[in-house]
Image: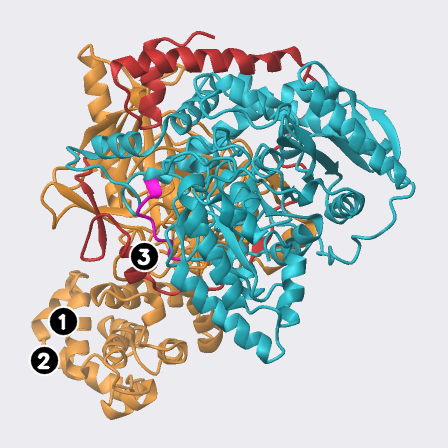
Chain colours: A red, B cyan, C orange
Amino acid sequence: MSLTATDVKKIAHLARLNFNERDVTTYSEQLSRILDFVAQMNQADTAHIEPIAHSLEWSQRLRPDHITESNQRDLFQTIAPEVSAGLYLVPQVIEGE
Amino acid sequence: MLYKTIAELVSDLNTKKISSQELTRFFLDRIQKYNPSLNAFITVTEEHALVEAKAADEKRAKGLAGPLTGIPIAHKDIFCTKGIKTSCGSKVLDNFISPYDATVVTRLKEAGTVLLGKTNMDEFAMGSSNETSYYGPVKNPWDSERVPGGSSGGSAAAVAAYLTPGATGTDTGGSIRQPAALSGICGLKPTYGRVSRYGMIAYASSLDQGGPMARSAEDLALLLNAMAGFDEKDSTSAETPVTDYTTTLNESLQGLRIGLPKEYFNQGLDQNIAHAIQTAVKEFEKQGAIIHEISLPHTPLSIPAYYVIAPAECSSNLARYDGVRFGYRCHDAKNLEDLYKRSRSEGFGDEVKRRIMIGTYALSAGYYDAYYLKAQKVRGLIHEDFVQAFKKVDLILGPTSPTPAFKLGEKTSDPISMYLSDIYTIATNLAGLPGISIPAGFVNHLPIGLQLIGNFFTEAKLLNAAHCYQKITDWHKQIPKNIITDEPSRLSEEL
Amino acid sequence: MEWETVIGLEIHAQLATKSKIFSGAPTAFGAEPNTQACAIDLGFPGVLPVLNKEAVRMAIKFGLGIGATLSKKSVFARKNYFYPDLPKGYQISQYELPVVGKGHLDITLEDGSSKRINITRAHLEEDAGKSLHEDFVGQSGIDLNRAGTPLLEIVSEPDMRSAKEAVLYLKAVHSLVRYLEICDGNMQEGSFRCDANVSVRPKGQTQLGTRAELKNINSFRFVERAINYEIERQIALIENGGQVAQETRLYDPNKNETRSMRSKEEANDYRYFPDPDLLPLVLSDAMIEEIQRELPELPHQKRVRFMDQHGLSAYDADVLVNSRATAAYFETVIKESGAPAKLVANWMMGELFAALNKSNLDITQNPITTTQFARLLARMNDNTISGKIAKTVFEALWNNEGDVDHIIEKQGLKQVTDVAAIETLIDKILADHPQQLADYRAGKEKLFGFFVGQAMKASGGKMNPQQLNDMLKKKLNG
């Protein structure tokens, strides 16, 4: 599976990562090799097997509708990069970004 | 005091041979002396530790000590510790002071342990050599030019060099067991769901499990007793009751059926390791175990499946690192997209980026079926392999790692060669089964480990078998005489 | 060229749980920014979601209310994209296996006929936070209080053919979720949100045209206006040789127009996959049956019953079943007053609703109790007071001037029913207006109203109109 520079840039954008041109080349080589490696999976006949996400056949436990958390804004915002008036600040969000 | 197990230290504390404060001071001094060359710790919590030690001594004086009261430990820096830096080995979290404690941390705290510090690890738990850490590689105490294994390399090295008697680790594809093997100590990955994942920074959610690392099976049992159990904050936490793992350590191994997977003993395995494992097998037979050959035919597919599933889950789990609410934020972001891209690209290391990219690709439109879905089906095949195997045997035995510790830098240029070193451990994570690694010999003066894999929630059996092995062997008691120190004479003094 | 409009609605109803869908933080509206966002809502490293039982129960209620198939096993999936109001970089939602499957709601069209709107599915998901732009130059402020609030996303089939039908469907869903007490339906506060997918095609064509998704419509009125604007825009575009782009458009209520927001072609690849931190949601028969038993009479059921039992018209029934509180008030008043349903209906929809609307009050904030209202209607029904006088009493009741009978007594409002008194009054009026009397008897029947008016004026409106009419007629006709 050969990834082109375009492929790499598209994936990088989805993952919000930047690569310079040299890295794009390196990554497209490395990623292509890894994808070739994992394509070994195709050797397996999985036509009659169900995909499993968790080994044990458990189902989701339900939590009672109680308020268990108190306001810890001050504590949480001591580690925030940029806050003002209790809000987290980011460069302006333009519709359609 | 040197190289005493936790069980022995508990006895010393109870018989007042030593106080927790003295014990803590002892380890803090060793950390100060040896950590600069080993780089096993990212953060040392000296003041905090002494405060906790004092409290432990007071508790003991009142007669209120529990099984672990006053025992110093270290946490892999993947466990959130309130008020203490929690970096996950990454620049992204270099400035992250966690506002809460992980459940594992709370439980070990409530059990009375004393926190010495946070150990080094591969960045976001991605790696098998502890070479991807933002804080630099960890050195193997047995040979400073070699890796201790990863991703829990810091915890492994810290225990191996006796900078702490016990530590926590996490295991997603072998990250407790493989470093335990390469560093000559014991490590247990519990059944998926046995130990709470709340506060354990997520890498691959359906595979991650936290577990103990220490110098003996008995010590692992003591630590696991405190760590294991249902947590309502974790939806994937098992409600299966926890037994006291120490009470069954000495059960007879008579009639225990042990399976040796033929796929584990093929050409990929270092012949010296194979030989050492065969010797170890005889020790089990001596105690009444019956050996069977079994087959886990889909073993080779476990690595490709893992390297789709884990990156896929991590690509999503790591999306929250965006510089907005915590963690690394780039300077002078021009716009939102720039904020995201530069914060993440400047923050994450190469291996993490590689896995995020693979994972993003595997989940993307048009590729989901061929990669992610296919991998989950292969996972089903691997699960089935074990189901069949456990119809015939009680435990599965094999080597933990195909090679002993390799040299620093040896595999970093070729990611795939690094991935292949997980061949014996990965399938266990995919199946959600428990596995333990214990020292079983030396190859070229480097420790090697044997692995036991059990059926779901059979940690007691694993620890029992390991303990019985350790009663008639002394590989786990060996200590590295090669610790980098400018005072070799002092070391022999302590011995 | 005749055009046909095709409309589908996606409704996001915030479920009225006390705590969030995956954490124990509170959901109350209006708190100071980020005071209701706990570590889980903020997506801190290491946190994990645990599912709120009440959110599940509410989804089941909705499914039962639309006669839908419920998925015994449904799966939570991650919808991955980057946005500052989405702390984890993914939204926990449901994708391939939603908890509620196909269902329907029937709406009553203007001509009284019924139309079935099919619902494709409804699923549980978490809400995102909010971005605020006003106070910051070049920056936005993110408030994550809302992040993690449970949402039920309700997706209709593209069954609607006009903006009016869309509004009727929207109102039907709005009514249902309030009946079931799973959502307060407050569109201004954002607890009931609607996106409309609108496309046009030549009449008779089966293939769907390209659709645009309209967002930011937060009132029933805006829904209608936005859709109508969009229909015209699309038709004009196509008739001028253009093509409708598949895109998201924002409705601007000030200018009454829709504007392109982002092209759906560039839309994110959401990379949905089952959330590994959550396990499949399995619904037991016992749970479903328990909830089924607890269901109140639903709007459409009540509507039918009101028409049958109380003889109401479809229109009146629709109005009175709009909320459970209104319907309950109506039926209580009927019982307590003994008055005919039609009378109660008219007075509720007339005087009462007018007063409530003017003061911007909800029926639950009505200052007039059912007892008092019932008494008022009873006094009208038994002729103690006339309809006209009743309005005066109503006003006094509204202003808290006391009990109905007390007001009637104090203001001396009792209707005059004494035959002799009425006769005397009529005689006087006829005597005072000989010209009109003569004109009437000569054939100007319209003047009847004049005499009625005079009599009412003279009596201060306290005459029983029926009695007055009868006696006046007799007297006029000699």
The residue positioned 27% from the left and 46% from the top of the image is C218
The residue pinned by badge 1 equals: C437
Q: Look at the numbered disc 3 and give the secondary structure of its residue.
A: helix
Q: Secondary structure at mark 2?
A: helix
Q: Residue at x 51, y 38 (%)?
A: B153
Which amino acid lies under the numbered mark 2 shown in the image of this protein? Asp
Please name the amino acid that badge 1 sits on. Leu
Task: Read off the chain for label 3.
Answer: A
Mark 1 packing: few (<14 Cα in 10 Å), some, or many (20+)?
some
Q: Quadrant of residue A97?
A: top left
User: Do marks 3 and 2 share a subunit?
Assistant: no
Which residue is tagged 2?
C432
Closer to the chain start, of discs 1 and 2, is 2
For label 3, the residue is A76
Q: Judging from the image, what secondary structure is the residue with disc 1 in?
A: helix
Q: Which residues are magenta?
A: B92-99
Q: Quadrant of residue C72?
A: top right
Badge 3, how many Cα within 10 Å: few under 14, some, many 20+?
Answer: many
Q: In this view of the protein, can residue C306 be seen by the observer?
A: no
Q: Is residue C186 visible?
A: yes
| Residue B90 highlighted magenta (yes or no) | no
